[in-house]
Image (tube, helix red, strand yellow):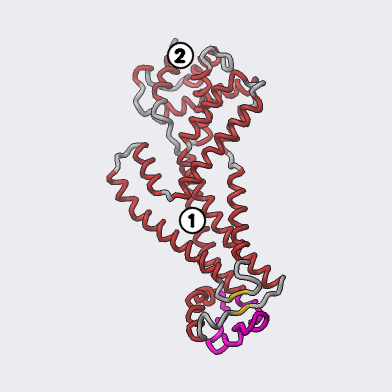
Amino acid sequence: MRQRALQAVLLVHAIEQTDLAGDALSLEDRVRASREAGEGRALPAAGEVPARINGDSERFLVRRADALLGRLRVRSPGVDRVLAAAAAATGLDRTVLLLGFLAGVALAFADGGRIDIFAYPLVGLVVWNLIVYIVLTVRTLRSPGLGRQAVDTAAAREVAALQHDGFFRRWLARVYTNRVHARIDAFITHSIGFNAPLAPGLRRFAADWCEVGRPMFRERARRILHLAAILAAAGLMAGYDLRGWILRETAGWAATVFGPTSAHTALVMLYGPASAVSGVRIPAARDLLSLAWSGSTTGGGPAGQWLYLIDWTALLYIVLPRLIAVILTTLSLWRRALTLRTPASFSGYLSAVLRSRET
């Protein structure tokens, strides 16, 4: 079932389960919507509903929910805001992305008032991302084995997905779920004077959606983390470019750390791919001597070529792989949004709806 359709069904279900007297949604409207949604269509008898309802039954529930929401909007137009709050991104997305960019900028300024051509903040960021890529690759290769051992149930798939996630993803997914719940609760609290009969149903809907939509929240958390890594790299590049092009800081290296030959070897290891792609040459070992800092204010040279190499290295090792991950995660998120399953308990709900239709 599509995300929006399932949210509509969950909302109507939550209202019906909490509004037994029909104050928010009249009993007559419910029966009428059931008959309209099933008119001319073959549906199972109330006592023959399978444990997992099929596509025809799901579509019946969607048509019925749309009809009831149409009636409900006339009296309580705020239900659309609740659905929008459940579906839209939260402020957490923007906060995490902004923090990622600011962290990258801060890292770019971490090596003092002169640009070190070895760009240790860049090295740390690249190493961290390479570790993440290795961990993700290992988990991806292990997941088929886990899938064969697990029982093919929603609970088993949920456990396997949680095992596939790392600590930060699990934490961010929980935070994301709580933020969605809090947004809906804030709207209910703000408008309870106008929607008092609806408040229990809306609160139940918030809890139900946060449970059913958990796989989507995990995918959103994955995508946010990949985007945050991209923005951290962008912040690092922006910080170094600011230092080199605007603040006119010089670039050099401390000769006490490496000798010219070992320094050249290290630079080739770090910037070799970037140099090959961009065409920016890495100076020979003898040319590096002129860039060695001989004092607190002496030595070094123009930072231009090193800024290009830093930017290209960040692009190759961080931005491009993470961008591919964002695309794959977005496709997975779209797939989940189109194929969400109704809760197993909905078979009983469908039976009750069908019985009301037959009376």
- Residue 136 in the image, given as x and y percentages of width and height: 41, 56
Q: Mark 2 highlights which residue?
A: 356
- Residue 146 in the image, given as x and y percentages of width and height: 31, 48
Q: Is residue 26 magenta?
A: no
Q: What is the C-alpha distance between the residues marked 2 and 1?
A: 48 Å
Position of the C terminus, as image quadrant, is top left
* Left or right, 192 with reference to 209: right
Q: Residue at x 69, y 72 (%)?
A: 245
User: Which numbered disc, 2 or 1, marks the residue that appears first in the sequence?
Assistant: 1
Image: magenta residue range: 278-306
Q: Is residue 234 above or below residue 330?
A: below
Q: Residue at x 48, y 83 (%)?
A: 262
Foreground mark, 2 or 1, reads: 1
Q: Is residue 120 above or below residue 43?
A: below
Decide which of 6, 16 is in the foreground and name it. Answer: 16
Residue 325: mark: 1
* Amino acid beneath label 1: Ala
